[in-house]
Image (tube, rainbow, N blue to C red):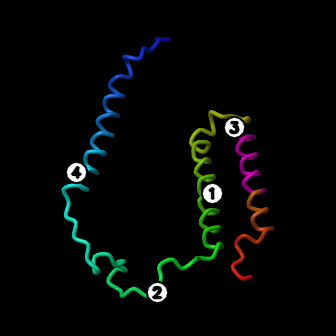
Amino acid sequence: MNASSPVDYLPIFIMFTIAVGFAAVSLIATHKLGPKRKTKVKLESFECGIETQGNARVPFSIKYFLVAILFVLFDVEVIFMYPWAANYKELGLLGIIEVFSFIALLLIGFYYMISKRALKWED
């Protein structure tokens, strides 16, 4: 194996410094040079052409966020199965055992979610 020296990472450091510098200069320049006209109409929230109704800070039911988090959780777990499906022939019996144990854990989590009535909307 080749031993890498810190000099090998110099181009990465330079590129990172330029990227952070560009972002910082862009943010500061637009803030300092941009117009500062704050009017009542400009400070109102924009509702796609519809007149605003009430406060935008109305609390949502926790069930909405729970369903969203569960969707993301199970969606990501299914994405983890793609590399196995692409290489299942090379993985052999051990790969099959591993994916079935993964699916079993996924189903245990799904059963737990159902048993706690996480998807039941009515109280």
Mark 1 neighbour density, 10 Å: few (under 14) some (14–19) many (20 or more):
few
User: What residue is pinned by disc 3?
Assistant: 95
Chain-order first, disc 4 or disc 1: 4
Secondary structure found at label 4? helix
Q: Kindly state the secondary structure of the residue where label 3 is placed.
A: helix
Q: Which mark is residue 29?
A: 4
Characterize the local packing of mark 2: few (<14), some (14-19) or many (20 or more) Cα atoms within 10 angstroms: few
Nearest-to-viewer mark from 4 and 3:
4
Residue under label 2: 54
The majority secondary structure of the magenta stretch comes to helix
Q: Is residue 120 left or right of residue 64?
A: right
Task: Check contact, mark 3 vs mark 2: CB within 8 A.
Answer: no
Front-most of 90 and 38? 38
Q: Position of residue 72 (x, y in %)?
A: 59, 59
* Three-letter amino acid code at the position of disc 2: Gly
Question: Which quadrant would residue 44 be assigned to in this image?
Answer: bottom left
Report which residue position mark 1 lands on. Answer: 73
Residues shaded magenta = 96-108
